[in-house]
Image (tube, rainbow, N blue to C red):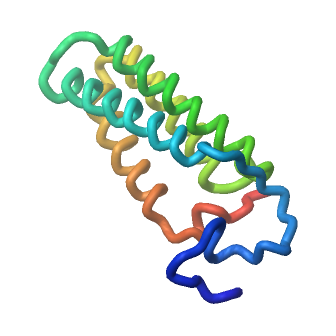
Amino acid sequence: MPSAPTFVFGPALRDQKEDDGHRDFAGRGLLINVLRVFHVAGLAGISAVVLAGMGGAANWGALMLISGLGIVALDAWANPFYFRQAKGLGTVLKIVLVMLLVVWEPGRLLLFWFVLAFSVALSHAPGRLRHKQLF
């Protein structure tokens, strides 16, 4: 693996001659970050619903779902193996659980904490685990 220079234009750790099927376009990182802002806002709203009894579960859930699907669509487009990797399959599981969290009020608190812990564990796991191809 090549060393990572301090200042680069492009992937620092990936061998740029290697064609692994990944795609990119100018502004994709910015677009994903904007979607993440909306996603975290949805998480804050769902947190208020679950932890403080506020209303609006469907609206906050929709914001999380739409922004999350946008992030997933961009990640899957950029990485053809996304849905074969732990990261992609874990994301599908999170989407299903968040949809269940929105509609199943008695299980909200348990699902909320499970999805939060699972999301943090998955997103902060080492790359070799997140990007492990499962099939």
For image coordinates 39% across by 30% down, the residue present is 38
Left or right, residue 42 beside residue 132 = left
Residue 64 appears in which quarter of the rendering? Answer: top left
Left or right, residue 109 beside residue 91 = left
Report x, y in % for residue 49: 22, 21
Q: Quadrant of the N terminus?
A: bottom right
For image coordinates 31% across by 26% down, the residue present is 108
Left or right, residue 39 beside residue 76 = left
Comparing 111 with 37, the one in front is: 37
Q: Is residue 87 above or below residue 96?
A: below
Report x, y in % for residue 61: 40, 20
Q: Is residue 68 above or below residue 84?
A: above
Q: Is residue 49 above or below residue 37?
A: above
Report x, y in % for residue 88: 64, 47
Q: Quadrant of the C terminus?
A: bottom right
Report x, y in % for residue 104: 38, 17
Comparing 34 with 94, the one in front is: 34
For the view shown, which residue lies furthest in the left direction?
52
For image coordinates 51% across by 44% down, the residue present is 30
